[in-house]
Structure formats: C-alpha cells, structure tokens
Amino acid sequence: MKSCKLVTIQRGTSGKRRTGAASGELGTTILDEGGTCLIYEFYTAWSPPLEFLKKVAVQWPALQFVLSYEEPGMAYKGLAKFQGEIHEDHCISL
C-alpha cells in the first residue's frame, strides 16, 4: 500500500475549506490544519495521484499542492509540487 501526504494551501477568499479526495484513497487523516495550510495523509492501492493533482492545480492556480509519497514495495519515493501549469515531480529509488 502506498503512503502519501498532501500539503496544500486550501482556504479561498470565502474562508470555506476546499479539499478533495483522490480516487482510490483510503484511511484519510488530517495531520495539521491551521491558517492557510492543510496537511493530510492517505493510503492508496494505486500510484500517487499525480495526474489528478495536475488537473486540480490548473483549476485552482492560486493554490499550491505538495505531495510526498512512498512505495516501499516498488522501492521508490518522491516529492511533487503543483501550482497552476507548473508541475514538478522528484522521484528516487530506495
């Protein structure tokens, strides 16, 4: 099972929470919530939701999404950042 932590700036000008779920996510836990940041952890039976975050980042260009992920069974981990059209993914072998 893959472990992911998503860190995102999540409050708009209305102050309403804007969070979403990646397809296949399991066991979501909010780790920290305060001010303009929300950190939550989830597990997925699939690969990290990079394509999902690319689409969401374009729809919400003022927000920055940071995803930390690890797949011990496949021996890789990484850190991905998304904001608008800018997408970075740094993945390494374990």
Image (cartoon, grey):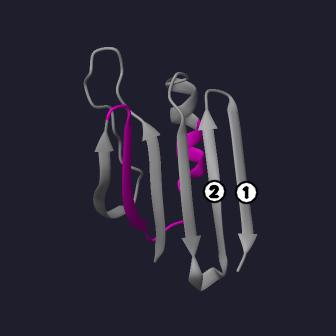
Count the labels in the image. Answer: 2
Residue sticking out furthest to the top: 13
The residue sitting at the bottom extreme is 73
Residue at 34% from the left image edge and 14% from the top image edge: 13
Q: Nearer the viewer, residue 89 or 52?
A: 89
Q: Are marks 2 and 1 in contact (CB under 8 Å)?
A: yes
Q: Is residue 58 magenta?
A: no
User: Which class describes the residues within 10 Å of circle 2: few (<14), some (14-19), or many (20+)?
Assistant: some
On the rendered structure, is 73 left or right of 5? Answer: right
The part of the image, by quadrant, that contains residue 17 is top left
* Disc assigned to residue 90: 1
Q: Quadrant of residue 45?
A: bottom left
Where residue 77 sits in the image (x, y, percent)?
64, 69
- Between discs 2 and 1, the one toward the N terminus: 2
Looking at the rendered structure, which numbered label has been put on residue 74? none
Asked if residue 53 is among those painted magenta in the image, a careful observer would answer yes
Q: Is residue 54 left or right of residue 38?
A: right
Mark 1: secondary structure? strand
Question: Residue 83's x, y, as percent?
Answer: 60, 32
Residue in the picture at 49% in, 25% down: 60
Image x and y of residue 69, in percent: 55, 64
How far across and down, in percent of the image, does residue 48 sit? 55, 60
CA gap, disc 2 to disc 1? 5 Å
Q: Is residue 40 above or below residue 74?
A: above
Quadrant into which the C terminus falls: bottom right
Q: Give the residue type that dot 2 points to.
A: Leu
Q: Which residues are drawn in magenta? A: 35-54
Question: Is residue 75 left or right of 33 when viewed as pictured?
Answer: right
Give the amino acid at mark 1.
His
Indicate the secondary structure of the residue bearing disc 2: strand
> Which residue is labeled 2 in the image?
79
Residue 93 position (above or below residue 52): below
